[in-house]
Amino acid sequence: MDLAQFVRALPKAELHLHIEGSLEPEMMFALAQRNGVALPWGSVEATRAAYDFSDLQSFLDLYYAGAAALIHERDFHELAMAYFARAHDDGVVHAELFFDPQTHTARGVAFETVLDGLERACEEARERWGISSRLILCFLRHLSEEDGFATLEQALPHIARIHGVGLDSSEQGHPPAKFERLFARCRELGLHVVAHAGEEGPPAYIVEALDLLRVERIDHGVRAAEDAALLERLAREQVPLTVCPLSNVKLCVFPRLEAHNLKQLLDAGLKITINSDDPAYFGGYIGQNYLETAQALQLSRAELKRIARNSLEASFVPESLRAPWL
Ligand code: ES4
Ligand code: ZN
């Protein structure tokens, strides 16, 4: 069995996937045309050519521009179905999807439109491929905590359909501490909590996410490597890190995959998972992330198995329902 087949055959969970980041340029253009939305690019090819990022912000500017093509319930449904089809091909048995309601409600798209379309896709993915899934509402950290509370208010009538909350968008200058009260409220509501931290931001943001937001997983977290005490804590507490290697290279967190610290984090005993982040923008879905990382860092098949098993263990599916995968 070659490595690509081995990776595909591993039952795995995807725990760090922004559904808006799976919008391929072809679908972006089809939706924009159908919806009468103007895009800043002239063609599919020009769009792909513009995906040359220097940092997180340079990506986010394009990501938010592309998301403007999504208007109707069926758009969100089509988007998520296309993702699930790709995920199924890659051997994903469970996916926890991030979605960014504020990106849509700010343009006049109703919260319910987004949720209805995504949820219908989740149900269809379960029926068609047996993929289980969860929806995680992400707050945009460049916006105020007040704006986050207003979004939570919109989510409240549907809270049973949402499994957790996360924190994404521009990290630098928007520390987890800014959202301490919002996350406390979310935890009171029984929601699972995660946050992006230590992608571009300092290790101190990871500590804040753990201590102030009480997150159950850290999204990215690669800059933990700069703080020996933090590394030791993450290993001791077995806090899952949802690492996205191709994303990190595209956003210049590491100059190339060979320089990624994933193997170092794994060797330090951290509970590492591999995920795709925004696959339409970063050049690969989860299988490609596993494969290219394995090749660049010379990961063994036992290590890849460990990483896939970590992803199932780190999922928000109760342990009793998880057994058939392992
Ligand atoms: C994101 Cl890679 C990344 N980082 C932070 N926020 C995001 N939203 C979508 N992708
Ligand atoms: Zn992300």
Image (cartoon, rainbow, N blue to C red):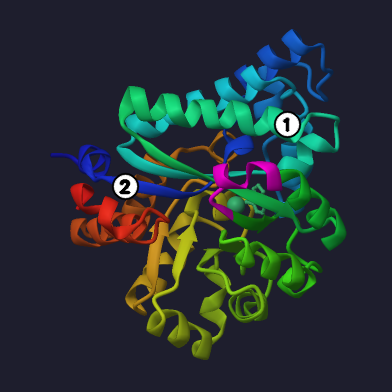
Eyeballing the image, is 48 above or below 272?
above
Where residue 232 sits: x, y (%)? 44, 87
Where residue 206 sits: x, y (%)? 61, 75
Task: Classify residue 91 as left or right of residue 204.
Answer: left
Q: Which residue is mark 1?
A: 67
Whichever of labels 1 and 2 marks the residue nearer the N terminus, that label is: 2
- Examine the structure image and report whether residue 161 is included in the region drawn in magenta: yes
Badge 2: how crowded within 10 Å, few (<14), some, or many (20+)? many
Element assignment for label 1: helix
Element assignment for label 2: strand
Q: Residue furthest front?
A: 157
In the rendered image, the quadrant that contains the N terminus is top left
Task: Classify residue 156 as left or right of residue 316.
Answer: right
Which amino acid type is shown beneath numbered disc 1?
Ala
Residue drawn at x 72%, y 53% is: 139
Q: CA distance from mark 1 to mark 2?
A: 27 Å
Q: Which residue is mark 2?
A: 12
Query: In which image quadrant can residue 37 be found?
Result: top right
Query: In which image quadrant can residue 185 be found?
Result: bottom right
Can residue 254 be seen in the rendering of this structure? Answer: no
Can residue 65 be seen in the rendering of this structure? Answer: yes
- The numbered mark at residue 84 is none
Where residue 282 sits: x, y (%)? 57, 41
- Examine the structure image and report whether residue 17 is included in the region drawn in magenta: no
Residue 130 or 279: which is nearer the viewer? 130
Magenta residues (range)? 156-164
Eyeballing the image, is 124 above or below 217?
above
Which amino acid type is shown beneath numbered disc 2?
Lys
Task: Classify residue 26 as left or right of residue 123.
Answer: right
Residue drawn at x 61%, y 66% is: 187
